[in-house]
Amino acid sequence: MAGTIKTARFDLRQTMECGQFFNWLRLDHGGRVGTPGYRVRAHGRVFDVRQEGGSLVFTGADSLFIRSFFSLDHDPAAIRSSMPEDPWLDRAYRSFGRLRLLRQDPWECLVAFLLTPVSNIPRIQGNLLSVFEKTGFEPGRMKPAALKRLGLGFRWRFLDSAALRVKRLGLEDWRKAGPEAMDGILGTGPKVKDCVRLFGYGDHASFPVDTWIRRVLRDLYRVKLKDRELRLWARERFGPWAGYAQQWLFAWSRTEWKPALRHGRGKVARDAF
DNA sequence: CGCCAGGTGGCCC
DNA sequence: GGGCCACATGGC
């Protein structure tokens, strides 16, 4: 299974590396000209994909799956237009407006985001790879003793709790039960749940508030609200596609705002932008 | 080599 | 409900 799909306003690298999804490896392209490719593990499959100009080139999956996984039916320009005028959003959109929110599998997505609390993206990615190699993401193979040896820190308990819960229902029924099936699983606070709603269940109005989004809204938008209200404020402001705004702002703040903060002797927080 | 990291749960008041 | 704090390690 291989193929090519023409795309518009799509950037594979932004999509893979913006922080919504961790289950990929960059393929060494041996010095060839062109964008680096990725080996992707998602929905229990493995496929390779790279971008050549306006086209997505893939092997190991069929085009229907690729269209769905990469949300090629979404229209970023229309999504941006559905939101209000906003200089900060403009900035973020200018840099990351070609990413697409992926359609991830809810269970794989939950496993990944249970590894995120007080961690960092390189580590999350490494941890996720270890978990896959050890368990194949099968709840039945997620034994405490095995999880403890993977360098997950305190997060091994979260996976253990999730695996226990899912084993009780069965993976298929658990998936079909929707986001409420996360209730009672250790480690699923508001942030993790919002991420799984957004990235795993396709709830595009969801707006996860993490440390970077919190800073952006506080220091740049000058919104002084608690996290709980911030989520609603953002949903209200950005509308049914608020999840895209979240991802644009998140990716931008980490890659462009954060470095400027570090070099700015502490005071460029807002005015320099 | 300290500091910090896509938070959360369990206390205390 | 709000304000602490430990949580277990690795990345930089």
Image (spheres, coloured by chain):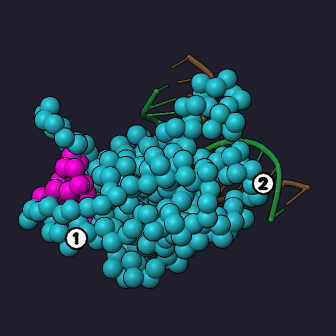
Chain colours: A cyan, B brown, C green
N-terminal-most mark, 2 or 1: 1
Mark 1 chain: A
Q: SS at mark 1?
A: helix
Residue at mark 2 shares a chain with residue at mark 1 = yes
Circle 1 is placed at which residue position?
Answer: A65
Residue A76 showing in the rendered view: yes
Q: Where is residue A140 in the image (x, y as percent from the top left)?
A: 32, 66
Q: Which picture quadrant has residue A176?
A: bottom left
- Residue at screen point 60% across, 50% down: A88
What is the three-letter code of the residue carrying label 1? Phe
> Taking C4 as reference, is A13 left or right?
left
Question: Residue A241, which numbered label?
Answer: none
In terms of depth relative to the viewer, which is nearer, A33 or C8? A33
Q: Position of residue A144 (x, y in %)?
A: 41, 55
Circle 2 is placed at which residue position?
Answer: A224
> Taking C12 as reference, is A183 left or right?
right
Q: SS at mark 2?
A: loop
Q: Where is residue A142 in the image (x, y as percent from the top left)?
A: 35, 60
Q: Distance between the residues labelled 2 and 1?
A: 42 Å
- Is there a contact, CB below 8 Å, between mark 2 and mark 1? no
Q: What stretch is highlighted in magenta?
A: A37-60
